[in-house]
Image (tube, rainbow, N blue to C red):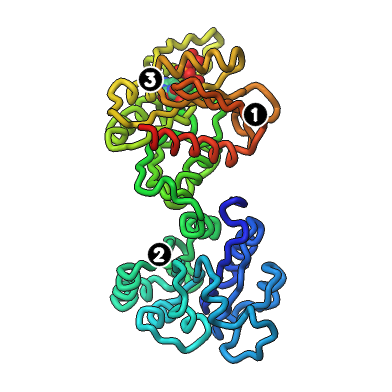
Amino acid sequence: MKRIFSNREIVLGVTGSIAAYKACEIASRLTEYGANVTPVLTKSACELVGSATFEAICGRAAITHMFAPLQNPDVEHIAVAQRAHLYLIAPATANFIARATHGIADDWLTTTLLATRAPILIAPAMNTNMYEHPATQENMQTLRRRGVYFVGPDSGRLACKTIGPGRLIDPMKIVEACVPLVSERHDLKNVRIVMTSGGTHEPIDPVRYIGNRSSGKMGRALALEAIARGASVTVVTGPSEVAMPEGALAIPVETAAQMAEAVVNLAQDADVFIGAAAVADYRVETPSNSKKKKSGKKLDLTLVENPDVLGLVGAVKRAKQILVGFAAETDDLLANAALKLKKKQLDLIIANEVNTDVSGFGKDTSKAALIGRDGKVDDLPLLTKEEVAERIMDRVVALIHAA
Ligand code: CTP
């Protein structure tokens, strides 16, 4: 996230929704990731939240008035609008959306919205009836048609005590939705990536399963990196500690068999397939339909081999399709990985040490080596999973160009 947001100029417009306080969290995350955030509060927002909070979080003066005396020419309206890499309006009220649709320029935010050429991302938050009203829906459609992006809203309990759509989507998802819009690299534009992520759960009975320690962190990092660089990303994900990023189409599955079924259909259309999931190699032959009771004796489970998801894709690999796999190894890392690369017809394999304190399942860092079909090996130092994902995507881009 830091590399993507670092030094990007973001105008954060906050409008008069009860959810305005949640914009503090958005400002905080964006600033933490290195973005330069200019907070802009409409008159109604100022009734709900204080500009001092945003100024402290962002380290910048908040813009609250159209005609405030200029203290710094850098804050001059048009200068801010022209410098911006992104206009993010979160939360956006029905009134703001209506004004933006009709080009009404009656405050700083709506005025500079007409002046900026930066992408515009809107996160609506309002009462369900207001959201579902044809006026709001048609306004949003008009804005979409003009190239404005939307994220959310969520459905749930609203401040007005109704339950339904209109709730501001989770601040982290809003931050994630900014990723492809602020990113500087677009070398995976128009590339369709299908991947697997997470672990699998193989049922023993209705309450127990055989699983593994996969957290899904590497899969999430790969999906985020690919989205940032312009790819369309579909992730078939088994149970995972982390959610897939906003912008990825996540298809949740539980077992290896379900993962194989979902992947076989999707992989046909993929330009790149990445097998990042820790797929259970075995499943219980006949899981019990009712909970197994203690019997005081040994319990034998017969395990049968699962389909090899990556292997299935490799078997029907199209010309120019790029296949990437992982090798989780505890011994003979490079030799074992190179064997898997060949056996599964891969273009690239990521050999991962999984038995150290700093690398492997659940960790934020990874010690990996990238081995190409051409024999090229990048033995990476210990890096964060986000950094490893960046290196993997660099190799994927090179493979696409070479194909
Ligand atoms: N893989 C898969 N389906 C399986 C097993 C593995 O798609 N049933 C994929 C993984 O996603 C990974 C690669 O194959 O990209 C290698 O997985 P790994 O567990 O390291 O190797 P295995 O092929 O299972 O071999 P082994 O367990 O014997 O090392």
User: What label sits on residue 359 in the rendered view?
Assistant: 1
User: What label sits on residue 149 in the rendered view?
Assistant: 2
User: What residue did someone put label 3 on?
Assistant: 345
For disc 3, the neighbor class at 10 Å (few under 14, some 14 to 19, many from 20) is many
Q: Is residue 95 above or below residue 246?
A: below
Quadrant location, the C terminus: top left
Residue 88 drawn at (x, y percent): 50, 68
Q: Is residue 54 above or below residue 195?
A: below
Disc 3 or disc 2, which is closer to the eye? 3
Q: Nearer the viewer, residue 296 or 127?
A: 127
| 235 lies left or right of 220 | left
Residue 136 drawn at (x, y percent): 34, 75
Residue 18 drawn at (x, y percent): 54, 74
Q: Are marks 1 and 2 in contact (CB under 8 Å)?
A: no
Disc 1 or disc 3, which is closer to the eye? 3
Mark 1 or 3 closer to N-term?
3
Question: Could you tell me which residue is drawn at 42 percent across and 47 percent down?
Answer: 248
Amino acid identity at mark 3:
Gln
Q: Are marks 3 and 2 in contact (CB under 8 Å)?
A: no
Question: Could you tell me which residue is drawn at 52 percent across and 76 percent down?
Answer: 81
For disc 1, the neighbor class at 10 Å (few under 14, some 14 to 19, many from 20) is many
**3D distance between C-alphas at marks 1 and 3:** 26 Å
Amino acid identity at mark 1:
Ser
Amino acid identity at mark 2:
Tyr
